[in-house]
Amino acid sequence: MSIYYSDQHSMQVLIAEDDLDIATLYKKALEKRKHDVVITSNGEDCLKKYLDALHHMTFGVSLPTLSMPRMPATRMDPALSSTGSSAFRSVNKSAPFDVVILDYSMPSINGMDVAKEILAINSHQRVIFASAYVKETLEHSIKQLKQVVELIQKPFELSKLVDTIEDKEVYEDLRTLNIDVDLVKAANPTHEQIIDLLERLKRIQKYRTF
């Protein structure tokens, strides 16, 4: 039997989605369940929001406003990194958000690069990718993140998104699946291994979103 967050537990949710209409639908659906939602329209802003929330949680104050150029798609802006990520790696192991939802394909810096930065800062952070191509996204997560994260295949029903986010067992069960990923992440996973992991991830997510 799944364990769900009650209405009294307000989850903190960070969303990166470059389609404002879609992001607004996510926000409205989650706010109906009394969750607190922060929307960002690109990977750069998502990282800024994440670092600011982590800094505020850790030190009780927000980061100073940074004026920075656009980040390349392959890495975080040096000013942001030096101000934020290295300072947190040994400071805080808890997460400022209950879940981070990332659109896989975004301009400037894509969802995978955002996840890479966030998980480098805080390996305990729960991340969900929204992607039209779940098999390819799973394969990239193994190769680049060295772990499996939750996947939602676009398009999907908002009720399924809410159910997945509120189901605490989903994230807990991923830990077991990620033990098996150790067997394949050192080398390029085979097609059969990816399909097997995808089917197991579907079962963990109760076939809700793909």
Image (tube, rainbow, N blue to C red):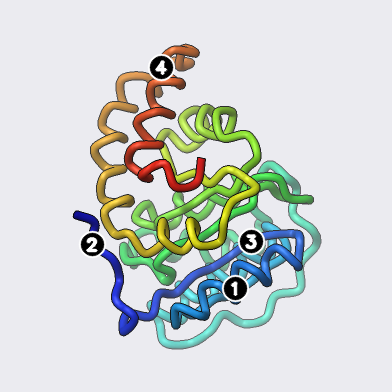
Q: Nearer the viewer, mark 4 or mark 2?
A: 2
| Disc 4: CA contacts within 10 A as few (<14), some (14-19) or many (>=20) | some
Q: Give the residue drawn at x 23%, y 62%.
A: 3
Q: Nearer the viewer, residue 142 or 58?
A: 142
Mark 4 = which residue? Answer: 193
Q: Which mark is residue 3?
A: 2
CA–CA distance in space, label 1 to label 3: 11 Å
Label 2 is placed on what type of residue? Ile
SS for callout 2: loop
The residue type indicated by label 4 comes to: Gln
Residue found at the very far bottom of the displayed protein: 61
Q: Which mark is residue 16?
A: 3
The x, y position of residue 87, in whole percent, is: 45, 65
Return the mark for residue 114: none
Residue corresponding to mark 1: 27
Q: Marks 4 and 1: which is nearer the front?
A: 1
Q: In which quadrant is the N terminus drawn?
A: bottom left
The CA distance from mark 4 to mark 2 is 29 Å
Q: Nearer the viewer, residue 13 or 146?
A: 13
The residue located at (78%, 50%) in the rendering is 107
Compared across the picture, whether 7 is left or right of 79 comes to: left
Vertical placement of residue 180 versus 35, above or below: above
Disc 1, disc 3: CB below 8 Å? no
User: What is the x, y in percent for residue 26?
Assistant: 60, 67
- Asked if the residue at tag 1 contacts the one at tag 2, i.e. Cβ–Cβ closer than 8 Å, the answer is no
Residue name at image x 46 percent, y 64 percent:
162
Q: Are marks 4 and 2 in contact (CB under 8 Å)?
A: no
Q: Are marks 4 and 3 in contact (CB under 8 Å)?
A: no
